[in-house]
Structures are given as C-alpha cells and as structure tokens.
Image (cartoon, rainbow, N blue to C red):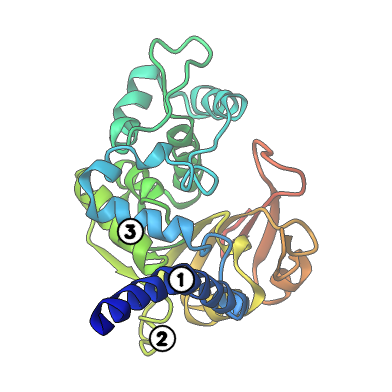
C-alpha cells in the first residue's frame, strides 16, 4: 500500500513539476538573451537568421527552399520588382548587356535555394531581382577596377551571391568571406554548388583576430558593414579595412549612423578615418539617405 501511495505521489509531483520546469527554462533563455552584449552583435545576428543559415547548410530540404524562408527574406532576398527594373535598366543601357548575357551570368543565382522569380519589363523569363542587384553592383565594380581585381575581401556575404557574380565578371586572385560562422557554412555549400572558380577562405572576425598578416586589394560590403554596431565596425576597420587598398561599401545607416536600434559610425566619422575616401549617391537609391562609401578609388 505504501509503495502504491509513493508511486501515485511521485507521478503527481512530476506532472506538477514538468510545466514549471518548462517555464523556468524559458525564463532562463529570456534572461540570457537580455544580458547578451549587443555591443558586438550585428542586425543579422538575431538568433533566427544564423540558425536558419546553419540548418540550410546542413539539411538538404531546408537548403532547397531557404531563399524563401521567412527567417531569411527580411535579411536578404527582398529586392522589390521596381528596384529590379531599375537595376535591369542600368545593366542594359549603361553596360550594354543583352538579355541572354544577363541570364547566363546570373544563372547560378536563379534556382539554387528556390528564390522568388518575378516577371519584369519585357524580359522573356521571370528573374531573381536579387541577382540583378548583384550583377549591377558587379558591373559597377568592374568599371572601377578593370578586369583584374586581385585579392578580394567581403564583409557580410549572405550566401555568396555577390562573389559568384564577380567570379563570372573578373579575374580574382583570392576571395575572403567574413560572416557569422553559421552563415559561412551556408556560403560554402552554396558556392560549391555554383561552380565558383576562385580560391577562397571563410572566416569570422574572432577566428581571424590573431592573424595580422592579411591584406587585400579590394573590400566589398553590400549594406552589411552599416548594420554593425560601432564597436564591431571599429574592429573591422582595424583588422580588415585598414589592410585593404580600395573599398566599395553600400551603406544604409544614413548620415547619423543609425540602423534601427543599432548605433554606429556616422558618415562624417567614417570619412575622418580614411584618407582618399569619398561619398557617392547610391544608384538607384533604394532607401532615403543610403549612400556609397569608397576609399582608394579615383573619382
């Protein structure tokens, strides 16, 4: 009889304790999240995006659709139809690219990861507007550098889309990707599936913190640098930007250096840190007060 009572009481205790244990665990998670030092966390380092990138890198089913996933599209894959039309107009009119040439160059970005494809202008097929952005930026960079860009470093690389386009347009000696470690795994999977021909390295800023020997010819960042808090920007300037001869960074933090709740370097502060630096209009302008920041490039 005593054993039966013990079993009944034990079972009742577990039933009562279990929901409280779940609640306690959730409270601990929230507590830990609240004390995380956002001083060193970018906009994309929000938990959901890096974990989705990691899952896509490891799971074939997720990889097959990740470019449509709601945890991914707010960070990338959100170029509008109107923006795509503006990029296409520049590609056709300024750079004289025919439609067949456009599709041939962006082909790796048209299908891998199941991107959203849109019908724009008089193109014969639906197209990835994100791929058009990468192509337009790639052609701008080619105009600045010529055919041989040398050793390239990119900060905040998504799945490697910009690198894939540059690999098609230019002669690249080496390509270094800097991103979150989870995202780096996704980049590796994507570019290996895309016939990326250049020699490449994947790294995080922490992973490379003890190596002061790196130097590059050209630095690229499509909006990513401007989404970093000031402390991280300062680290990248010290370890990467100051060791790069020329740079091309599209910025979406405005004149004052604010991206949402992230406070970073203002346009003036950024200019003061570089010699031979310039501010240019973003063309086409995709958001008010966006701009292009370059250094080491003759106007």
Which of the labelled discs sits on residue 93, or is there none? none
In this rendering, the label closer to the viewer, 1 or 3: 1
Dot 2 or dot 3: first in sequence order is 3
In this orientation, which residue lies closer to the viewer: 275 or 248?
248
Q: Is residue 259 left or right of residue 47?
A: right
Against 123, is 282 above or below?
below
In this rendering, the label closer to the viewer, 2 or 1: 1
Q: Which residue is mark 1?
A: 16
Q: CA distance from mark 2 to mark 1?
A: 49 Å
Q: Are marks 1 and 3 in contact (CB under 8 Å)?
A: no
Residue at 50 percent across and 72 percent down: it is 20
Against 268, is 59 above or below?
above
Which of the labelled discs sits on residue 54, or is there none? 3
Count neighbours of disc 1 (C-alpha within 10 A) and say few if under 14, some if 14 to 19, many if 20 or more. few
Which of the labelled discs sits on residue 209, or is there none? 2
Dot 1 or dot 3: first in sequence order is 1
Q: Is residue 130 visible?
A: yes
In this orientation, which residue lies closer to the viewer: 188 or 99?
188
In this rendering, the label closer to the viewer, 2 or 3: 3
Residue at 27 percent across and 48 percent down: it is 190
């Amino acid at each position: 009889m005593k054993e039966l009572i013990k079993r009944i009481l034990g079972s009742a205790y577990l039933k009562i304790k279990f929901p409280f244990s779940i609640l306690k665990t959730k409270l601990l998670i929230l507590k830990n999240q609240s004390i995380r030092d956002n001083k060193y966390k970018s906009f994309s380092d929000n938990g959901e995006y890096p974990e989705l990138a990691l899952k896509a890198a490891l799971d074939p089913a997720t990889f097959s659709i990740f470019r449509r996933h709601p945890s991914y599209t707010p960070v990338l894959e959100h170029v509008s139809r109107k923006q795509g039309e503006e990029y296409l107009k520049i590609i056709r009119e300024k750079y004289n690219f025919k439609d067949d040439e456009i599709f041939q160059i962006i082909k790796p970005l048209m299908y891998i990861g199941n991107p959203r494809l849109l019908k724009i202008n008089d193109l014969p097929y639906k197209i990835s507007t994100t791929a058009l952005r990468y192509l337009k930026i790639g052609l701008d960079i080619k105009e600045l550098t010529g055919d041989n860009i040398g050793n390239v470093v990119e900060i905040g690389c998504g799945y490697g889309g910009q690198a894939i386009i540059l690999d098609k347009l230019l002669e690249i000696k080496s390509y270094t990707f800097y991103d979150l470690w989870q995202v780096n795994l996704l980049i590796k999977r994507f570019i290996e599936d895309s016939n990326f021909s250049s020699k490449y390295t994947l790294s995080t800023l922490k992973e490379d913190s003890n190596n002061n020997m790196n130097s590059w010819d050209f630095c690229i960042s499509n909006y990513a640098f401007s989404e970093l808090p000031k402390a991280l920007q300062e680290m990248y300037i010290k370890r990467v930007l100051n060791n790069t001869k020329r740079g091309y960074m599209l910025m979406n933090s405005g004149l004052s250096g604010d991206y949402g709740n992230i406070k970073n370097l203002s346009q003036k502060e950024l200019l003061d840190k570089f010699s031979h630096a310039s501010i240019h209009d973003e063309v086409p302008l995709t958001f008010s007060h966006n701009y292009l920041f370059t250094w080491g490039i003759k106007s």
